[in-house]
Amino acid sequence: MKYALVVFPSKKLQDLVNSYRKRYDPHYALIPPHITLKAAFEASENQAETFTAQLKEIAKKYNPFLLKVTKVKSFEPVSNTIYFKVEPTPELEGLFADFRDHLPGDPPPYPFVPHITIGQKLSKEEHADIYRQLEMVGIEHKEMVNRFHLLYQLENETWTVYETFHLGKD
């Protein structure tokens, strides 16, 4: 079974992101807007039971934190993905490193860039046009994050929450 770890932003931010994703992201129907902390990896259900205990311990290490979304960016030329940039925080970077180091799966192919995808798999022309438009609109958003989620993938390729982990000791 495939698993992944993510942070879901508030409904307000998800609604804004989805206003773009429904037009520019073919994965729109598969998963809500999110920040990926560990990309999809394979594990058995027995392994998942074991690492959920680890995830509870990891969650205790980190306090809730302020999520800041500051601008529209792109991964071009690596890919024609357009995203809202999430400012890195010690908590996001620590969670990413702990998940990378303590959970199954291959090491990530790229450095960690916290972001929320708003468009992907666009043609070169679409990418250039949409990116210019969204850059002019911009974004400035802040909210508190106090949890992350372990997801699993269903047979129809949609993702659903397996378990939610609250940050902090309590």
Image (spheres, helix red, strand yellow):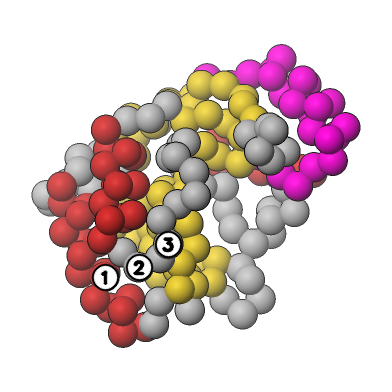
Residue at x-position 58% and y-position 53%: 32
Q: Nearer the viewer, mark 3 or mark 1?
A: 3
Residue 125 included in the magenta stretch of the image? yes
Residue at numbered disc 1: 51
Q: CA distance from mark 2 to mark 3?
A: 7 Å
Q: Residues within 10 Å of mark 3 (few under 14, many from 20)?
A: few
Residue 130 in picture, x, y percent from top left: 79, 29
Residue 140 in picture, x, y percent from top left: 52, 19
Q: Amino acid at mark 2?
A: Pro
Q: Nearer the viewer, mark 2 or mark 3?
A: 3
Q: Which residues are magenta?
A: 118-140
Residue at numbered disc 3: 106
Q: CA distance from mark 3 to mark 1?
A: 16 Å
Check disc 3 and report its element: helix, strand or loop. Answer: loop
Residue 156 included in the magenta stretch of the image? no
Q: Residues within 10 Å of mark 2 (few under 14, many from 20)?
A: some
39 displayed left or right of 31: left
Q: Amino acid at mark 3?
A: Asp
Q: Nearer the viewer, mark 1 or mark 2?
A: 2
Residue at x-position 59% and y-position 58%: 31
Q: CA distance from mark 1 to mark 2?
A: 9 Å
Q: Where 130 sits versus 156, above or below? A: above
Q: Amino acid at mark 1?
A: Phe
Residue at numbered disc 2: 104
Q: Which is nearer the N-term, disc 1 or disc 2?
A: 1
Check disc 2 and report its element: helix, strand or loop. Answer: loop
